[in-house]
Amino acid sequence: MSRILAISGSLRRGSYNTRLLKALQPLAPEGMELEIFDGLADVPVYNEDLDVDPAPPAVTRLREAIRQADGIVIATPEYNNTIPGVLKNAIDWASRPHARGPLRGKAVCVLVATLGRLNGFRCLSDTNRILSGMGNLVISEPEAVVSSAPSTLVVEPDGSVRLTDPMAAALITIQLEALADAVKTDAAGQLRDAVLRNQPMLNRVQFYPFVVRALGEGATDEAIVERLSGANIDARTATAWITEARAA
């Protein structure tokens, strides 16, 4: 049995994307169980000053739900041609601590439900790009955008939801089967481990230029070390970079 966490990028009570998540279980392959996360509204706006141990309770709940899930399904609307702020905020929290956040090395698929027939693909592309860049294995095709959501996502008398668009249902079924295969083979975990083996080199590429720039702007060694600690760079490595940059 694989446990898939389903996250909606909309907080609206009548959200079509939350409705879409409720329609997924009948489309899922045997052995996949989807659980909808309902605490996104409680997650505060990301602020590094709040990103301490222990984290705010709503953040801890989000991180633990993602950490314990075998895979992730996100259904999100498109706001102003891109990803909604509430979803991006949740992703920012779940990406931390740097290089050790729970939303890394996960198998993920992204769906979009929209009112019309022209929107959704920009948000889908942006969300996939963000998640892929964080080290997740994103099931990027076939792209699944459920258009005309008010008429294609039908709420039954018992409260269940049925997706009436056969093409969208077929695309989502393929995505969920690919997600199940990725979970079964631990493809996302293998990707994560490959990256972790090269993490010291990646850290240097990403953060050494900051050290050079900060020294040029007159920052103290202590300030640089403290700032890098927020990116999970240990003091010894930070000090070595500072020494190298001063000698260059």
Image (cartoon, grey):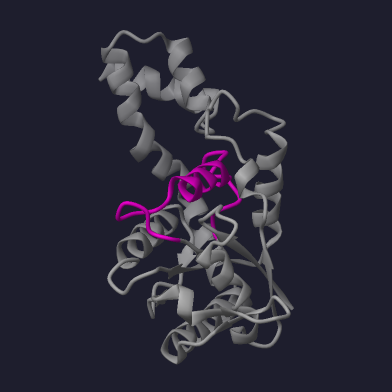
Q: Is residue 89 magenta?
A: yes
In this rendering, is residue 13 above or below 110? Answer: above
User: Can see residue 74?
Assistant: no
- Which corner quadrant of the image does residue 3 belong to? bottom right
Q: Nearer the viewer, residue 132 or 194?
A: 132
The quadrant the C terminus occupies is: top left
In this rendering, is residue 126 above or below 220? Answer: below
The quadrant the N terminus occupies is: bottom right
Give percent across and percent down for residue 82: 34, 54
Residue 2 appears left or right of 104: right
- Which corner quadrant of the image does residue 97 belong to? top right
- The residue drawn where x is 47% and y is 79% is 151
Q: Nearer the viewer, residue 184 or 16?
A: 16
The magenta span reads 77-105
In this rendering, is residue 175 above or below 134? Answer: below
Magenta region, main secondary structure: loop
Give percent across and percent down for residue 36: 66, 64
User: Can see residue 141?
Assistant: yes
Q: How many marks?
A: 0
- The residue drawn where x is 28% and y is 21% is 213
Give percent across and percent down for residue 237: 48, 28
- The residue drawn where x is 43% and y is 68% is 112
Residue 27 appears left or right of 87: right
Q: Is residue 82 magenta?
A: yes
Give percent across and percent down for residue 31: 71, 83
